[in-house]
Amino acid sequence: MLKKKSLISAVTVISLLFTTVAGNYTVSAVSAADTGSTNSLITYSQYTQDNPAVPDTEGKITVDALNPTQHSDDVSIVENIHELGKDAVVIPDTGNAEWVFTAERDCAYMLRITYAAAEKSGGNLELELEIDGKTPFKEASLISMRRTFTQSNGEFETNVAGNDIMPASEEILRWNTYDVSDSTGYTDTPFVFSLKQGQHSIKFTGSRGKVAVSAIEFLPLETVIDYAEYEKQYDGSAAAETDPIIIEGEAFSEKNSATVLPTTDRTSPATTPQSAVALKLNTVGASSWKTVGDAITWKFTADASGMYEIGIRYRQNLSDGIFASRKLYIDGKVPFSEAAKIHFDYDSAWQCEKLGDGETTYAFWLEAGEHTITLEAVSGDVSQIVSEVNAALNSLNRIYRRIVMITGSSPDVNRDYGFDELIPDEIEEMAEISDNLRACVEDIKEQAGASGSYTSIIDKLVFQIDKMTEKPRSIAENLKQFKSNLGSLSSWLLSAIEQPLEIDRIFIQPEGSELPKAEKGFFEKLAFSIKSFLASYVTDYSSIGQTEGADSEDREELTVWIQSGRDQGEIVRDLMSSTYTKEHNVTVNLKIVPTGTLLQSVIAGIAPDVAFDCLTTEPVDYALRGAVVDLTEFEDYDEVFSQFSEAAIKPARLNGGVYGMPQTFGFNMMFYRTDIFEEYGWEVPKTWTELKKLIPSLQYNGMEVGIPHDSSMYAVLLYQNGGEFYIEDGKYTNLKSNTCLESFVDFCELFTLYDSPVTFDFANRFRTGEMPLAIQNYTVYNQLIAFAPEIKGLWEMVPIPGTEDENGNINNVSVGTTTYMMLMETSQNKDTAWEFMKWYMSPQVQSDYGMRMESLLGNCAKVNSANNEALSLMAWSSSEYRNLTEQLKNVDAIPQVPGGYYLDRVLTFAFNRTYNGSEEQTMGEDPAEVLTQYVKEFNEELAQKRKEFNEVLQNEK
Amino acid sequence: MRNKTKYTLQRMRKSKVSYLFVAPYMILFTIFTVLPVVIAMFLSLTSFNVLQMPTFVGLENYGRLFLKDSVFMTGVKNTLILGVILGPGGYLLSLICAWFINELTPKIRSFVTLLFYAPSISGNAYLIWGILFSGDDYGYINGLLIRLGFINEPIQFLQNTDYIMPVVIIVSLWTSLGTGFLSMIAAFQGVDKTYFEAGAIDGIRNRWQELWYITIPMLKPQMIFSAVMSITSAFNVGAVITAICGYPTTDYVAHTIMNHLTDYGTTRFEMGYASAIAVVLFVLMISFNQFAKRFISSIGK
C-alpha cells in the first residue's frame, strides 16, 4: 500500500518547502482565534528556518515535573494519582505551572509529556505552552492531548428489532505519552524545539480539562529504521506455523477519541457479521474516523513466533481521488519508517489487501503471546501539499490585498493599472507560488494515481495565476474570480486533511498465506440484495428507537416525538440505548415526525408522552387549551430549572405555571471581522452611541452594519431602555408607553437615519467584508464555520452593544428564542416522562449529544443547548465560551401571552410603513405615530383571546 | 311514493355492476371531499379551539365575519381582484399560448410546452421571484435599477404596500399556466383537420374566423375544464403570497380569503371561525364557476 518511501527526515523537507514567508494575516491553526496576540507569532516554518535543526544525539533533558518552580494556587501535586503508580502535578483549566531547567549545549529536541486525565470528561486535554516566557511558534501555542476510551469488545446488545445498540464509550484513566506535534496535521512529524545552552523555563497553562503531568522530557529526535533494514534483521526467520488470526474491526480494545464509533455497513454481504434484516454494527470508522490523531487499538494473541503479514478489509470511499493514511504501531511502536504512512486507496467498493508498498508485502516479526496493533489517522504524504497550499494561500491573500489597495475592490477592467511596474515583486512571487503548487500537484497525482478530482481546485487556481502573471494587464479583470478561487481553496484545505477509513476485519496471518476476496460473487450479492429488499417491507423505519430487553412485561412505555432531522434522532437513540434504557426500566419509542403533526395527534388522541423541538410559541398555545402539563407541579422543578436561564423559561410561563422545558436557546450576539477592524483601527462598539458613531466611517469605506429588523431586535432596544411589552399580565399592550415609542423611534432610525440595509444575506456579506459588523443570533456561528472557512480566525463573536444610563452603567441585555420539550397532558406515565426529560437535558447527555453532532456533521454542528452547564462542556474555544457566558448573564426574552402572535405583526407593519414611507418625504410618517395607530387593534386582539380563554386565565395560582 | 322507491331500488339492482364500478370512487369522494365540507359547515356554527370540544354558537361566526372583521373584507376584495385578473387573465393567456404553440413544429412544440408548463410541475419554483424582487441591493431587479442609476436605495418590493399587489399578480399569472393550459394544447391537436377544409369550402376566410367558428367550439369541454381550474386556482391563491411576501403581508394589502383562513386556522387556532371563512369561500367559488360555465357555453353560438 505504501507506494512511496519517505525521503529524508521531514524536518528538512518542511524547511525546504516553506520558501515563502507568511504575513500577518495567516489563516491559522485552531488555536489562533483564542489569543488575540497569536496574530503576531511566527509560524513553525519560520521557526525552523530561524533555528536550523541540529539533532542532539547524545542525551535528553528531563524537567523535574513534580517540582514546578512556580505555579498558581489551584495546581496541586498528587501522589499516586488514580493508583496508577506515579505522582503527578495536576493542572486544571484555570491554572498554570512553570519549570526551570538547563540545557547542556545548543541542540534541537522533541518534547515528550507523560500525562493522564485527572478527571473523566470527554473532550481532548489542552494546555497552552510557553518556553522562555513566550510561545515558540503559532502551531505550538495550544497542545492537544488525547484521552483513552473503551467501547464494548465487539459484542453488542440488540433491541427488539434485532438491531445492534451502540454502546457508550467509557473513559479509562491511565498514563500516556505525547510528543508535541501539530494537531491540525499540516506537519506530520513531532515539532522540533531548538534550545540554546543555558537556563530555560517551560510553562503550561490549562485551557481545557484537568491534566495530570508526571514527566516532561526533551528527547533527541527519534530515527526509525526503514523496511530494508527491518527485513535484514529478521532475514531467515520462517513464517509462523499457525492459523490466521482474524480481528473484527468493531471489536477494538481502545480508542483515543469518544467520537470514533463502530458503524453499520449494509452494502456488502462479505462484511461480517452481516444481516439482511437487522442493522449490525459490523465495521468501525468511516466518517467518524477522519480527524488526524484519532487512533484505534486492537488486541490479539499470536500462537507461534515467526513472520506474519497483516491484511485489512477496508473501504475508503469518502476522500475522492486521494488515499487515506494511517500510522501503524505494533505494541505501541512503529516497526519501520514506511509503516508511519500507509496508504489506503480510494475506491467505492470494499478492498482487501496486505499491508505493503504496492510491490513488496511487509512481513512482521511477532513473538508468541499478546500483542496490540494500533492504527492512527495521520496526514502522511498529503501533509506536504496541504502545508504548501496553506503557505501559498497566506501569500496569495496578502498579494490580493496589495492589488486591491491599487484597484479598489471593484476594479475598472478597461484600465491598464500598470501592474508590472507597480508590483513586480508580487508578480514574481505569484509565478513562484504557481510553480510550487504545480510541482506539488504532480507529486500527489503520481502517488494517488491518475484521478485529478482531489487537486482540481488547485489546478484551477494555478491556471489563473499563470494567466495573471503572463499578462499583468489581465489582473484587474481576473480579480473577482481570483478572490473566489482563494475562498474555495481555503475551504478545500479543511477537507483535504481529512483521512476517513472504514475497517471491517484485520487478518494477521503467517507470511505467504492467501487473503479472502474483498467481495462475494455476483449471485451471493444478488441474493443478499433481494433479501434486504424484501426485509425493507417489514421494517418500521419511523420508529428508530425501540429499545428493550426480553423482559418487557413490567416495563413502562414512553413515546417520544422528535420534530427535527434523522441525524438528531439517531443520536438521541444511541445516547438513550447506551445509558438511559439500561439504567431505567423503561421502553422508549422514539419517532421522527414532521413538524406540524403534533397538533393533529393531540386532536386524534394519539399524542406522544414527550414532544421535542417545539417552537417558542407552542407551550403557551397548548397550555391555554389544556394539552400540556405544568412542570412546576413536579417536586424537583426548582432544582431542575435552575440549569436554565430565566430568559429561556420566560416564553413558557403562563399564569404562574411553566409549560415546557427549554431545549435549545439562541440569543443575539455581535459578529465582527477582527482583520478589518484592525486594518482601519476601529474599536468594537460597546454601546449604541459608539455604534452609531462608527457607522459613518464604515459607510465612507463602502461597508455597512447588519442589524435585523425583527421583533427580537426591537426587544433588545426596549429592554435596554427598561421597557416592557405588556402590562397587567398581558391584558394590554404597553406599546403606547413613552419608553416603547422612543425605543421604536430608535429602532427605525437605525434603518432610516443610519441607513442600515433592511434585506441582506449576512453570511455572504460578512465573508466578503462588506458587512464587517452585524448583530445576529449566535447560531449563525455554525453557518459561518461551514460557509466561510476562509475567514476562520478572522472574526469574533462578542456581546451586543448596550445602552448607557446617567450613571455610566451599560445595559447590554440581549434577546433570545427557545425551543421546548413539552410533556403532553394525555401521557399515562407523567413521572417517567419527567425523568426522561430531566435525563435528556442533563449537562452530560447534552454535551454528549453536542459532541456526537459535531463528530457526525463537523464543527459546523454546534448545538445551542439551553442547559448552561452543558454549554461549557461543548467544544467552544475559551474566548468564544467567555463571550457567550458574558452575554448569557444578561439575556431576556419576549413573553408569550394569549394573542401574542399579534406583536410581530404590529411591529412589522409599523416598521414597513415607517421605512417605506420615508422614501417619499411628503408622507412623513412618524414612527411613533404609526405604532400608536396599531395599539387599539392589538388590544382588541388581546381582549378577544382573553375572552376565549377566560376560564383558564381565571384559575390563577 | 312507495312504488317510486321500489322502482328506484329495482333499477339499482338491475345495474348493480355499474354501481360496483362507481363505488370505490364514490366512497373515497364521500369520505375525503363531501364529508369534510359538511363537517366544515357544521363547525362554522361553533367555537372550536382545535384541542377542546367545540361549543355551539349559532351564526355568531358569520356575524363577526361580515360585520366586525375588516381584515376579512380586505381579503374578499383582494381575492375578487385576483379572481377577476387571474381567472380570465390566466385563462386567456392559456388559450393564446396554446394557440400559438400549436402552430409550431412538433419537436419545438413539445419543448416550448415543457417550458410553459414547468412552473406548475415544479411546485415551489415561484420562489425564484423572491430573488428577482428581493429587497437586498443584490436582488436582481434592485441591482439592475441601482446600476442603471434609477434608484439609490433598494426598493422593498415585498414589504412596501405600493408594490406587493402588482408583484403578487405577476407571479400568480406566471404560475397559473397549469393543467388548463396543457389540456388546451392537447385539445388543439385533437381537432380534426377535415373540419378546416370543410370550413374553407363553406367560406371561412382567415385564421381568426377559423379560431372562432371551428377551433373554439370544438374545444368547449376542455375550455370549461380549464376555466374551472383557473377560477379555482385564482381563489386559492395564498401560499404563493406567503412564500414571496411573507405572512401576513404589510397592512394586509395582499391578504386573500385563503390567507385569512390560514391565519385563523393555524395561528389563532379558531377553527370554528376559520370554517365559516371556508364556507364563504366555497359558496363564492361555486357561483363563479357556474357563471363561467354559462358564459363559455354561449361562445361561438
Image (cartoon, coloured by chain):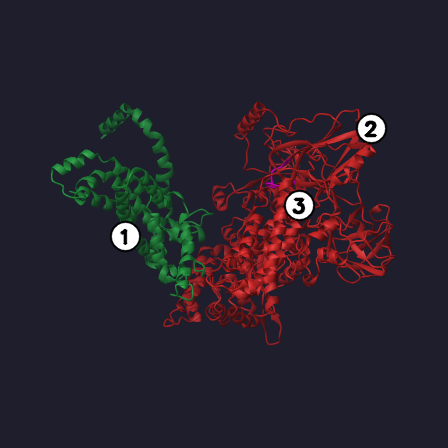
Chain colours: A red, B green
- Tell me, for residue A354, which label it has, or none: none
Element at label 1: helix
- Which chain letter goes with mark 1? B
Quadrant of residue B152 in the image? Answer: bottom left
Q: Main secondary structure of the magenta part?
A: loop
Give the amino acid at mark 1. Answer: Val
Q: Find residue A35 and report its horizontal and vertical position in percent.
A: 69, 61
User: Is residue B7 at least partly visible in the picture?
Assistant: yes
Residue B179 counted in the magenta span: no
Label 1 belongs to which residue? B84
Residue toward you, A800 or A605: A800
Task: Mark 1 vs mark 2: give the one in front.
Answer: 2
Give the amino acid at mark 2. Answer: Gly
Q: What segment is highlighted magenta in the picture?
A: A315-323
Q: Quadrant of the C terminus of chain A?
A: bottom right
Label 2 belongs to which residue? A236
- Disc 1 to disc 3, C-alpha distance: 66 Å
Q: Quadrant of the N terminus of chain A?
A: top right
Residue toward you, A152 or A718: A152
> Which residue corresponds to the image point at 81% horizontal and 46% vertical from the top-left?
A222
Label 3 belongs to which residue? A382
* Sooner in the amino-acid sequence: mark 3 or mark 2: 2
